[in-house]
Amino acid sequence: MNNSNKKRYSFAQFKKDYGGIVWCIPVLLGILIFTLFPMGTSLYWSLGEYRQVSSTLSGQAQYTWKGLANYVTAFTNDWDRVFGSFKATFLYALVTIPTGMIGSYALALFLNQKIKGISAFRVLYYLPCIVPAVAGTLMWNAVTDVDSGYINAILVNVFGAEPFPFYSSAKTVYPTILMLSVFGWGGNMIMWLAQMKNVPTEMYESADLDGASYFRKVISITIPMTTSMILYQLIMSIIGSLQTFSAYYPIYTNPANSAAKDQLNFIGIYIYQEAFVGKDFSYGCTLSWLLFAVIGVLTACVFKTSKWVYYGEEQ
């Protein structure tokens, strides 16, 4: 009897002392296997020459230690291409981050109103976000193709107008990106709405008693109370825009868009081209770590200057 009680006590004590650690083990293993191990491998590859020597992706590869030679190459012999890719990526980020954040925030403000049928519009606007990125890219590529796209087919055959160049001209690349990015605001819009719903209604009621206008309430209540989500959206937008790849790779490789390749040669595309097209995995890993460093510095700067963020009343 005493032994049984001792066993039950020991198990209960074990759960109390180590239960949390046990539940964390699967997560820690996942981080180790799927994050830390690949990162360590890519760092090791970036310090050498790891090239595929057969024609198939699963074929034989050779590794030779080279130290920092790949990083030296990136900043010397290949600097023009590396700088050009980062320049195109930063221009893309400067165009899409402000418009995406401001546009989706304004849309969330509109959808946060009590208007008949607004719930149905929320669902319809969010639908494009559930389409896989590659499938969506192929769809838009078919729609905007300068030679066979549906939009240009309508412009030429129905209205007798000249075809719109879309991605085939350097002058229309960013207007096209902005036009199509509107359909990707649904995810951000949902998060803005969730944060806006958490703003205490008493604050709006007090503002109404003081005769505050709608725009005054937005500026004085809604925006300050959603700064934590603004910080999150800013960081995720920076990371997402600098890592952009799958949404534009089919467009980049389309021969009809060759005139705008400099504008579409994002660093993510350049990494893929080096690693999987050129089969120079080591240099691809080197470029990946340079991108990781840039993202890390920018993210740290955003956190360092985040004193404007409101996290709620301190307990």
Image (cartoon, rainbow, N blue to C red):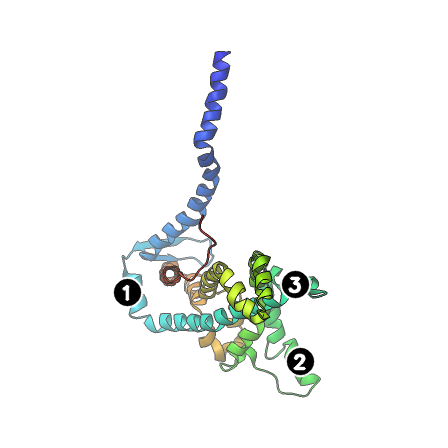
Position of residue 22 measured from the top left corner of the image (x, y, whole percent): 46, 34
* 2 over 50 or under it: above or below: above
Which is more toward the observer, 57 or 307? Answer: 307
Q: Is residue 217 left or right of residue 156?
A: left
Find disc 1 in the rendering and name its residue.
72
Find disc 3 in the rendering and name its residue.
122
How far apart are the alpha carbons under marks 1 and 3?
A: 50 Å
Position of residue 167 measured from the top left corner of the image (x, y, whole percent): 54, 77
Residue type, numbered disc 3: Arg
User: Does any portion of residue 265 appear in the rendered image?
Assistant: no
How far apart are the alpha carbons under marks 1 and 2?
A: 49 Å
Which is more toward the observer, 300 or 140? Answer: 300
Q: Is residue 225 left or right of residue 290?
A: right
Q: Is residue 39 left or right of residue 186?
A: left
* Residue under the image location 63 percent in, 77 percent down: 148
Secondary element at tag 3: helix
